[in-house]
Amino acid sequence: MRTSPVLRDIAAVLRRYGPWAYGSTRRDLYRTTHRWAAAGFTPEEVEAWLKAGCFDPDTAQAFVAAGLTPTDAAQWTDEAVGMGGYQETLGHKAANGDLDLAEAIAYVQRLREGQ
């Protein structure tokens, strides 16, 4: 079975980030690679979202649809933002289910307005 260059390159990006980015098995890597590709992301875009802490392609796709970028998703939050009481990037908190999209958008808008 031949793998397309895009799938191969996305898998390589995910491997560089390790199990945090895709899970713990080869099957997880395969599924996650295909999820990113099916969502329309290039290997370079996958890298940008992972750098922002966003390990979930559905979350990244929702951010894009809302006009947010990996740079926006890479903004660090404090413990009061979202759930969980921990500091992390918007992308990570959203991908982890600890921050909903509306909260992320509002946070970015406040940052852009300098508040």
Image (tube, rainbow, N blue to C red):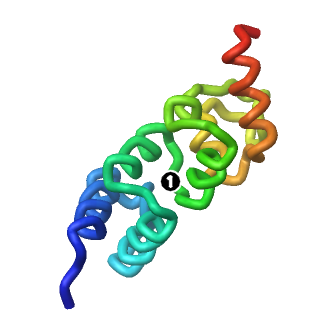
* Residue 108 in picture, x, y percent from top left: 69, 26
Q: Quadrant of residue 21?
A: bottom left
Residue in the foreground of this view, choosing between 104 and 86: 104
* Residue 73 in picture, x, y percent from top left: 57, 35
As displayed, is residue 28 above or below residue 77? below
Kindly identify the residue that appears in the image at 21 percent across and 68 percent down: 5
Q: How many marks?
A: 1
As displayed, is residue 53 above or below residue 110? below
Kindly identify the residue that appears in the image at 44 percent across and 67 percent down: 23
Kindly identify the residue that appears in the image at 50 percent across and 30 percent down: 71
Q: Is residue 72 left or right of residue 85?
A: left
Q: Quadrant of residue 86?
A: top right
- Which type of secondary structure does the marked residue at label 1 adopt? loop
Which residue was labeled with disc 1? Answer: 55
Q: Is residue 79 left or right of residue 24?
A: right
* Residue 49 in picture, x, y percent from top left: 46, 45
Q: Is residue 43 left or right of residue 31?
A: left
Please identify the quadrant where the C terminus is shown: top right
Residue in the foreground of this view, choosing between 89 and 85: 89
* Residue 62 in picture, x, y percent from top left: 65, 52
Q: What type is the residue that disc 1 sits on?
A: Phe
